[in-house]
């Protein structure tokens, strides 16, 4: 299974940064959004990269259960 993840900057929100990334699930590319409490995009991106495997696992589980809101799997910090 491909492990490609593409990180896309997201608009700053008052509750912290949100990072959007694409997850390869077989031939499907699924958009995922990680909401953090971190103040900068760089911090949020670094946090995502540090915990990438865990977030990919959770995103795949939610995708399999159909927990998709407007075509996006929503994730939050651990």
Image (cartoon, rainbow, N blue to C red):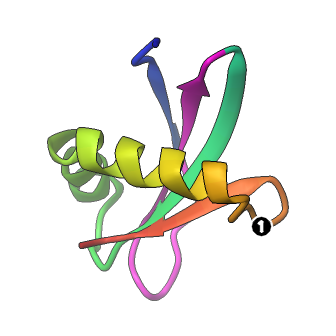
Q: Residue 73 magenta-drawn?
A: no
Q: Is residue 39 above or below residue 7?
A: below
Task: Out of 17 and 47, give the one closest to the viewer.
Answer: 47
Q: Residue at x 20, y 48 (%)?
A: 51
The location of residue 40, given as percent across then percent down, is 30, 63
Residue interval drawn in magenta: 9-26
Q: Residue furthest left?
A: 50
Q: Residue 16 magenta-drawn?
A: yes
**In which image quadrant can residue 28 be found?**
top right
**In which image quadrant can residue 33 be found?**
bottom right
Q: Residue at x 43, y 87 (%)?
A: 15
**In which image quadrant can residue 10 be found?**
bottom right
The location of residue 77, given as percent across then percent down, is 30, 71
* Element under disc 1: loop
The location of residue 21, given as percent across then percent down, is 53, 40
Residue underneath mark 1: 69
Answer left or right for 18 relative to 65.
left
Q: Residue at x 63, y 50 (%)?
A: 63
Q: Residue furthest bottom?
A: 15
Task: Out of 11 and 53, give the one closest to the viewer.
Answer: 53
Quadrant (top left, top right, bottom left, bottom right) of the C terminus:
bottom left
Q: Is residue 14 above or below residue 31?
A: below
Q: Is residue 9 above or below residue 2?
A: below
Q: Residue at x 67, y 37 (%)?
A: 30
């Amino acid at each position: 299974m491909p492990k490609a993840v593409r990180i896309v900057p997201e608009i700053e929100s008052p509750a912290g940064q949100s990072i959007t990334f694409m997850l390869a699930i077989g031939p499907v590319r699924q958009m995922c959004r990680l909401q953090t409490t971190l103040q900068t995009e760089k911090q949020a991106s670094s946090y995502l990269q540090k915990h990438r495997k865990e977030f990919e696992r959770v995103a795949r589980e939610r995708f399999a259960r159909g927990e998709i809101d407007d075509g996006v799997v929503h994730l939050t910090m651990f």
